[in-house]
Amino acid sequence: MLKLYLHIGMPKTGTTYIQNFLRLNNEVLKSEGYVYPDFGVRFDAIGVNRNGHFLVSAIKDENGKRLKEKELEIENECFDKLFNLFEAFPNVILSEESIWNSGERKRGKKFWNNLKSKLDSRGIELKVIVYLRRQDLFIQSFWAQHVKGSDVSYTLKEFINSSRFKHIKLDYYKRLNQISSVVGKENILVRVYEKDQYIGPQKTIVSDFLTTVGLEYNDSYQELERLPNRSLSGIYLETKRQLNKIEGLNKRRNYIQNLLKKVADENDDVHSITSNEFMSGEDTYAFLKQYAESNEMVAREYLSREGGELFLDKLEVSDDKKTEYTAYDYVGVLAQMLELQHIRAGELSETISELKREIKELKIQNSKLQSTVDWVTTSFPKKVTRKLKRIFKPKKKA
């Protein structure tokens, strides 16, 4: 049976790590009858390893108008390549985390119907993989990611009260039922984004994912050298949030983000959010209470847990976290950023000097070579010198 495993997120559940891991180990996957394809399509501000993005891509012109015909053209092109892959591999894996929150919003209410219809016509079984993260931890990590990577300058509370928050699917039972009503509950593979709930021999996110799709982690797979897409927190995240208010410093993925990550890394403060760093205890309990019944239903109906426990990690709350910073705190971070820039400028200056020395040496060598050519042309018969001149004649610039 041909199977398409569609990993739909949710965001902030190790999706970037999983995607990079699959891309790195694609040859190993192929040897097992699986493939994580690259369709050769690139989208602005979308990681190259998000190979399922063509399903929900929003392509716009310079005026911000959506080019729906172009989107459909790319989608059809990728589906053609996808169907061709099934001639060589019985299992194909696609991954795109934005499908969880905005699949229907970007492609219409019949998103899942259209996808399933295309696959059914080719005899391809659809398996949907989703990782669920406890709502309080997710929303903090999601907000922090937007502060780190774009121009977001509002607080977490302001974000929760904004229109952007309304599009985030945190009622997991409702969202899963929307999808399962089309693809079938038996075809949704629900996993929980908690270390102690991972399956597979290594109990890691990748061993969990591989086991979920029917593979077993072994020594053939390579691990990533570093954790991608790590979060900022504390004073570093707050510095970024404040800088996002300044025109010119709030562009997506600019040098400020990279500088702050380096400073935080040197202070060993770049990590995944695993506790309540931005919410008070009272706010945390109130936030989770509204999803308690939904979580219980997910645990019972999608994970066959009669007790109704979806998340098992201990709820850690503390109201003694430092959330307000002084000018001295900000100056300290900015000073470290300036120091890094100073070091980088020195390294670039040394590189430039080295290149100048190499250019000077090349000029000396060229001068010596020219002298040799001049000597040859005056010492040998004209027939020989004409031939040498043609060989050493500089090529005209195009």
Image (tube, helix red, strand yellow):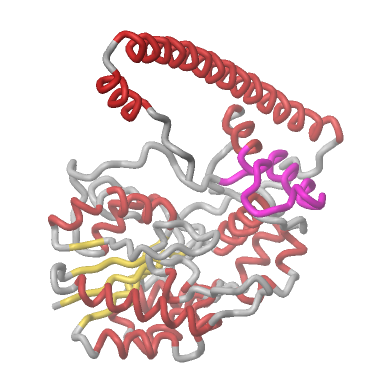
- Relative image position of residue 181 (x, y in whole percent): 39, 89
In this orientation, which residue lies closer to the viewer: 35 or 180? 35
Look at the image and tell me in which quarter the N terminus lies: bottom left
Front-most of 222 and 180? 222
Specify the quadrant of the image occupied by residue 40: bottom left
User: Residue at coordinates 75% horizontally, 70% vertically from top-left?
Assistant: 161
Vertical relation: 345 (above or below) 7: above
Residue found 56% across the figure and 48% down from its top: 273
Residue 177 sits in quarter: bottom left
Magenta region: 231-258
Where residue 211 appears, as percent x and y from the top left, is 24, 59
In the displayed structure, does residue 397 sit left or right of residue 147? Answer: left
Task: From this view, report whether residue 86 is shown above or below residue 320.
Answer: below
Residue 233 percent location from the top left of the image: 65, 43
Give the answer, above or below, for where 155 lies relative to 236: below
Magenta-drawn stretch contains 230:
no
Taking the spot 56% from the left edge, 72% from the top edge, the residue there is 170
Residue 78: x and y in percent read 34, 74
Q: Which residue lies most toward the front here?
A: 382
Residue drawn at x 26%, y 42% is 222
Q: Tell which residue pokes out farthest to the right in this image.
A: 327
